[in-house]
Image (cartoon, grey):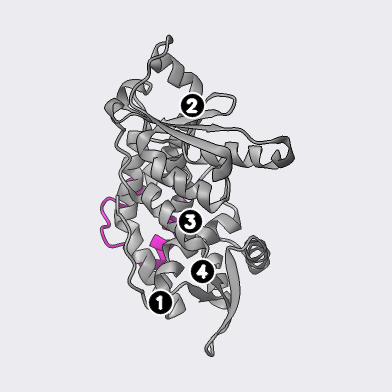
Amino acid sequence: MTESTPRPSSLIHTVYGEFVRRLGGWISIADLIALMAELDVDAPAVRSAISRLKKAGTLLQERGGGTGTGYRLSPTMGPVFEEGDRRIFRSLEPAELADGWVVAVFSVPESARAHRHTLRSRLSWLGFGNAAPGVWLAPARVLPDARRLLERLGLDAYVHLFLSAEYAGFTDLRTAVAAWWDFPAIEGRYADFTDAWQPVLASRAGSPDPAPAAAFRDYVPMLTQWRRLPYLDPGLPAPLLPPDWNAVAARTVFTGLHSLLAGPSLRHVEEVTGLVTAAHHRQEP
């Protein structure tokens, strides 16, 4: 469906975050292999990806009662997925200029220079733009996620966070923002998503109740491709965005497919695994 096939580990991450987490957090390796086969991922690739996720601390091996060996989400992943829910499933309405900005200034001593790349990549992941070396900014609403992430990674000692009400510099703000964020790259990712999934949404428009297995085969790769985009795009104020900002079209496609496919996909996972949905709440789009 997409120009580049998602990595098995990314698909597994989606399966755990969207389904397994709601079914108690554990799934047998046999059931996971069966589900991944429907996404054209073979058993050796699944086992290799699981090994990497286990090494990274994402998954913990655990035997189920009479159901064989499986893997449970590490407790440390709870905050990560909760943060993802807030980003992925909330509406990305543009921020207001009056809301102001959060500014992150960091300085890493030479003895801890390995943290510099981590800080840059994590701030970029949160949607911060790079205004100058060691100076990053984003709409003020990103502050809570930034605080939680930096504290969780143990990077808060290197960063100062400031809230600023308005820009008071010498360059036109729209021009400056275009230099701080890579708009063509973000729009390219949105265009790729829309090109890949708009035809799927159009083909399903007349089928409000898709078969669970078919829904699962579309929904998991779609969500896997989408979940990176809300991090690249922090929801900048509309006056600062390029004309015809294509995030709007992409969000419409995502919301439409999510509404159609999420429920049937969960039912399919329940049918395959025999697991029962646990109480779980998240903010829907």
> Does the stretch in magenta take in 226?
no
- Give the quarter of the image for residue 141: top left
Kindly identify which residue carries mark 1. 271
Q: Nearer the viewer, residue 237 or 99?
A: 99
Residue at mark 4? 35
Q: Position of residue 111 (x, y in %)?
A: 74, 40
Mark 1 crowd level (few <14, some 14–19, many ≥20, 10 Å Cα) = few
Residue 203 seen anywhere in this rendered image of the structure = no
The amino acid beneath tag 3 is: Val
219 versus 120 height, above or below: below
Tag 4 secondary structure: helix
Mark 2 and mark 1 lie on one chain; the one further toward the N terminus is 2
Image depth: mark 2 or mark 1 in front: 2
Nearer the observer, disc 3 or disc 4? 3
Residue marked by disc 3:
80
Q: Residue furthest bottom?
A: 66
